[in-house]
């Protein structure tokens, strides 16, 4: 579905400029760490949008691996909306949209499959919770995230899962979680970047890995 933007001022080149003054991610890191990010990553995570505006990234899946337990974990996660990749196919297209919403950002990932409809994964990054950043996947389930800069990449790590029921937020025991989730955003130059996801269980080891290379398509 195409989106329509309402101009905020008479059409000029300045009125369509995306300002790089969103400090929400920056404020979760020491200035020294933020300063070690490549300029392209700094720009991607400093764009300020009005509510409802969207940036689109198009890419190609380059890696998708599961252990048998990881594959079953991804299938079981369908009961809370299917937040984990389901397909081992590589080379197919993947589209990510980031839409500004009140209090955070809605991330939508569309993974094409050769057989059947694409898988669509929705989540919301909210600047809230015990670490100041959490990923909400639906059905009351969210995970607290920390961010760091490692080897000039921006790294997101889960540090606990919780279930919200009405006003109550209940921590989920480790037995009911997939393990440690790590998302790495690394710049490749030439307006390209790699997005990788790893889930590692403390006893069972690495269960799932997916990576894709993207470029910005529209903003």
Image: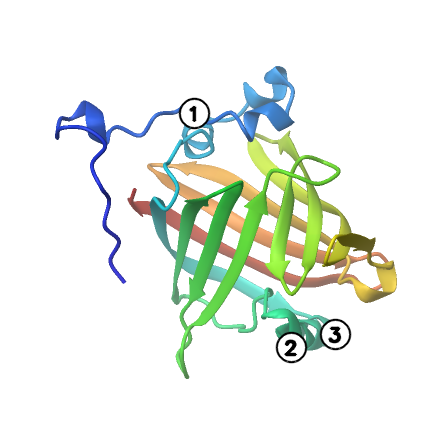
Tell me where residue 109 appears, x and y as whole percent: 46, 59
Which residue position holds label 1?
A: 39
- Pointer 3 or 1: first along the chain: 1
Which of the numbered marks, if any, corresponds to residue 69? 3
- Alpha-carbon distance for marks 1 and 2? 38 Å
Q: CA distance from mark 3 to mark 2?
A: 10 Å
Position of 1 compared to 66: left or right?
A: left
Q: In this picture, is 195 found above or below 18?
A: below
Q: Residue placed farthest to the bottom in the image?
A: 115
**Which numbered circle lies on residue 173?**
none
* Residue 90 place in picture, x, y as percent: 46, 67
Q: Position of residue 178 (x, y in %)?
A: 75, 62
Q: Residue at x 70, y 77 (%)?
A: 72
Look at the picture and state if 26 lies above or below 211. above
Q: Residues within 10 Å of mark 3 (few under 14, many from 20)?
A: few
Residue at the image position 53 percent from the left and 40 percent from the top: 103
Q: Is residue 203 left or right of residue 56?
A: right
């Amino acid at each position: 579905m195409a989106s329509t933007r309402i101009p905020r001022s008479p059409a000029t080149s300045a009125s369509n400029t995306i300002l790089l003054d969103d400090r929400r991610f920056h404020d979760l890191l020491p200035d020294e760490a933020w300063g070690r990010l490549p300029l392209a990553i700094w720009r991607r995570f400093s764009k300020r949008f009005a509510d409802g505006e969207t940036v689109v990234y198009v890419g190609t899946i380059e890696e998708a691996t599961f252990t048998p337990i990881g594959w079953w974990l991804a299938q079981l996660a369908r009961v809370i909306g299917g937040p984990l990749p389901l397909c081992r196919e590589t080379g197919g297209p993947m589209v990510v949209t980031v839409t500004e919403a009140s209090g955070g950002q809605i991330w939508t990932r569309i993974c094409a499959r050769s057989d059947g409809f694409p898988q669509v994964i929705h989540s919301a990054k909210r600047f809230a919770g015990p670490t100041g950043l959490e990923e909400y996947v639906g059905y009351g389930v969210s995970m607290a995230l920390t961010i760091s800069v490692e080897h000039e990449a921006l790294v997101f790590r889960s540090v606990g899962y919780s279930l919200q029921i009405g006003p109550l937020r209940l921590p989920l025991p480790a037995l009911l979680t997939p393990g440690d989730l790590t998302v790495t955003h690394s710049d490749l130059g030439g307006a390209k970047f790699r997005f990788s996801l790893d889930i590692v269980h403390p006893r069972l080891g690495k269960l799932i890995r997916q990576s894709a290379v993207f470029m910005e398509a529209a903003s």
